[in-house]
């Protein structure tokens, strides 16, 4: 089959995923729903003028329709007080609720049905730059990553976020917060300065390292179990040249072992990250292809030196170039589309093993012979932990900073629900292969918010912190109002 690799290179950089940074700002739930109540007349008058209550789930469209929550009611909030009123109302009436911002959280642990409420935080999307000695950004719980980057860039600063423009900024951060700039600035949770949270009593409280250290620890890694974060302040980093070097390299499949062992041996300096994808060329041929996407927040000369061992493997196409900071995530924009079925399976790794990746490639090639699943991809994201490792493990409930080096994902994508079993079989098969040589003492997903499927035991997503988190859960949310995402109750 004829494949034009140069066109492919351009196409891949335009369509490929790097989906860390998926998720909602936070989630909440009371355990038992009672009979439907007239929420429009009961809650409506308590909300601000620009809030709205809708009974169509299209008022809160989601990224994946696979096992998605199907609320009977969506409350579009527009102030923090709207969140307070909605939570109080739901708690008083025994209504289960779930907060949503970017709507990319794909976990299958949500139990939201016709009697229940989705609190759509998208209206809380203000972003302001605070020009102080340590500059910060104050971001609303419904802001998405592109909005935060735009304001940071306009003020001459970087801010560590996830890499998908359409994803909720705080949802991605509250599970740990990985992203291209984390080598320079650390994990998202390390860059939180303070946050506002609606707690299980429906009170709006400010949480930071001094005001409530236990809750501060818990929310930074297990956020959705402890409240709805309505706004947060994040560190920003002034930087004259904010542009980045990124793009894609396409390789023939015989290079897989060499690529994997080179990535495994690559020293990831602070400005670096690198992804490896198995993806297809898309319609109509869906030709399986090996793509490497390096990223460097620094000069092109430094980037080419840092990635020399990868470039030397000899890609058949190379679309690396400079992009302004505001376009650093553009490669993922095509993946932002809502809808379709995307059951996704991830695992953390401490090493990259060539034979494992050869087996996964073989599985992938078989799988995408069915063009109906041809938009599905398999990938690994490799970040620099140089800065994150300067922060102790115990500083937050994010459990894996010193053990997990690489984070992987099977990103299924199709529309026909009858393909669910084959997609699930593929996802679990590949995840098993990853786990079989993960080099870790226990199975782990990288960040529970972003990469877990939903069937994982608590230790896989919360690591060693399960017991401490459960203790704090009894203190802060004894009735399990916030029990939608890998519940600790
Ligand atoms: C609620 O917000 C969503 C954006 O998240 C928007 O698409 C929808 O139109 C809003 N619904 C109403 C009734 O305002
Ligand atoms: C793959 O994605 C493209 C672009 O979104 C879409 O046009 C095409 O229909 C998708 N193919 C399948 C099989 O889902
Ligand atoms: C890790 O996951 C694999 C399946 O993917 C399973 O066979 C194994 O028992 C798990 N290990 C632990 C320690 O739970």
Image (tube, rainbow, N blue to C red):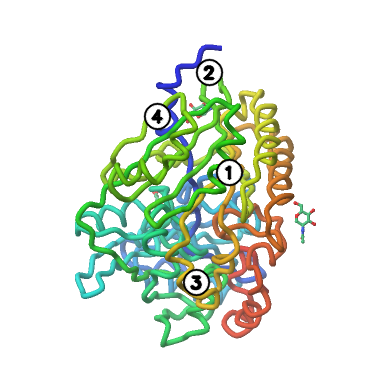
Q: Which residue is mark 1?
A: 65
Is residue 305 rendered to the left or right of residue 410? left
The N terminus lies in which quarter of the figure? top right
Q: Quadrant of residue 9?
A: top left
Q: Quadrant of residue 430?
A: top right
Whole-angstrom CA distance, mark 3 to mark 2, is 43 Å
**Up-down relation of residue 249 to residue 194 (above or below):** above
Name the residue nearer the viewer: 15 or 87: 15
Q: Earlier in the sequence, mark 2 or mark 4?
A: 2
Query: In the image, ligand 3 is in what quadrant?
Result: bottom right
Residue that badge 4 annotates: 318
Q: Nearer the viewer, mark 1 or mark 2?
A: 2
Q: Which quadrant, please, contains the C terminus?
A: bottom right
Question: In 3D space, how far apart are the residues under numbered discs 2 and 4 (Cα atoms)?
Answer: 23 Å
* Secondary structure state at the residue bearing disc 3: helix
**Mark 3 or mark 4: which is in front?**
4
Q: Secondary structure at mark 2?
A: loop
Q: Earlier in the sequence, mark 1 or mark 4?
A: 1
**Residue at the spot x=22%, y=52% of the render?**
241
Q: Determine crowd level at label 4: few under 14, some 14-19, many 20+ residues with C-alpha closer than 10 A.
A: many
């Amino acid at each position: 089959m004829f494949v034009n690799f140069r066109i492919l290179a351009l196409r891949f950089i335009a369509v490929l995923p790097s989906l860390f940074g998926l998720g909602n700002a936070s989630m909440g739930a009371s355990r038992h729903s009672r009979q439907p109540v007239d929420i429009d007349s009961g809650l409506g008058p308590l909300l601000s003028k620009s809030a709205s209550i809708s009974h169509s789930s299209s008022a809160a469209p989601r990224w994946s329709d696979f096992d998605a929550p199907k609320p009977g009611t969506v409350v579009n909030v527009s102030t923090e007080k709207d969140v307070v009123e909605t939570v109080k109302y739901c708690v008083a009436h025994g209504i289960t609720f779930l907060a949503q911002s970017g709507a990319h959280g794909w976990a299958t642990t949500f139990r939201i049905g016709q009697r229940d409420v989705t609190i759509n935080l998208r209206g809380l999307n203000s972003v302001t730059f605070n020009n102080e000695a340590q500059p910060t950004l104050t971001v609303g719980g419904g802001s998405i990553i592109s909005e935060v980057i735009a304001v940071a860039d306009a003020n001459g600063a970087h801010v560590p976020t996830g890499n998908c423009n359409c994803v909720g900024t705080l949802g991605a951060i509250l599970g740990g917060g990985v992203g291209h700039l984390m080598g320079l600035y650390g994990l998202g949770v390390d860059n939180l300065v303070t946050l506002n949270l609606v707690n299980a009593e429906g009170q709006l409280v400010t949480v930071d390292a001094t005001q409530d250290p236990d809750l501060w620890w818990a929310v930074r890694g297990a956020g959705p179990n402890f409240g709805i974060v309505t706004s947060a302040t994040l560190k920003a980093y002034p930087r004259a040249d904010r542009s980045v070097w990124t793009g894609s390299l396409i390789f023939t499949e015989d290079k897989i072992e060499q690529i994997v062992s080179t990535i495994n041996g690559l020293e990831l300096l602070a400005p670096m990250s690198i992804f490896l994808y198995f993806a297809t060329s898309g319609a109509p041929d869906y030709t399986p292809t090996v793509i490497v996407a390096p990223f460097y927040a620094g000069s092109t000369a430094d980037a080419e030196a840092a990635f020399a061992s990868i470039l030397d493997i000899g890609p058949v196409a190379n679309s690396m170039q400079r992009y302004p900071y505001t376009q650093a995530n553009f490669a993922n924009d095509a993946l932002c589309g809502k809808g379709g079925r995307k059951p996704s399976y991830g695992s953390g790794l401490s090493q990259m093993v060539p034979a494992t990746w050869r087996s996964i490639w073989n599985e992938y090639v078989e799988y995408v012979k069915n063009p109906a699943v041809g938009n599905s991809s398999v990938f690994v994201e490799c970040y620099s932990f140089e800065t994150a490792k300067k922060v102790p493990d115990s500083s937050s409930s994010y459990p894996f900073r010193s053990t997990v080096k690489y984070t992987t994902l099977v990103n299924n994508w199709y529309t026909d629900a009858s393909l669910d079993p084959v997609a699930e079989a593929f996802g679990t098969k590949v995840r098993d292969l990853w786990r079989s040589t993960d080099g870790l003492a226990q199975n782990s997903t990288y960040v529970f918010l972003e990469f877990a499927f939903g069937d994982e035991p608590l230790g896989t997503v919360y690591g060693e912190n399960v017991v401490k988190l459960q203790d704090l859960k009894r203190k802060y949310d004894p009735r399990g109002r916030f029990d939608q995402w890998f519940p600790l109750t």
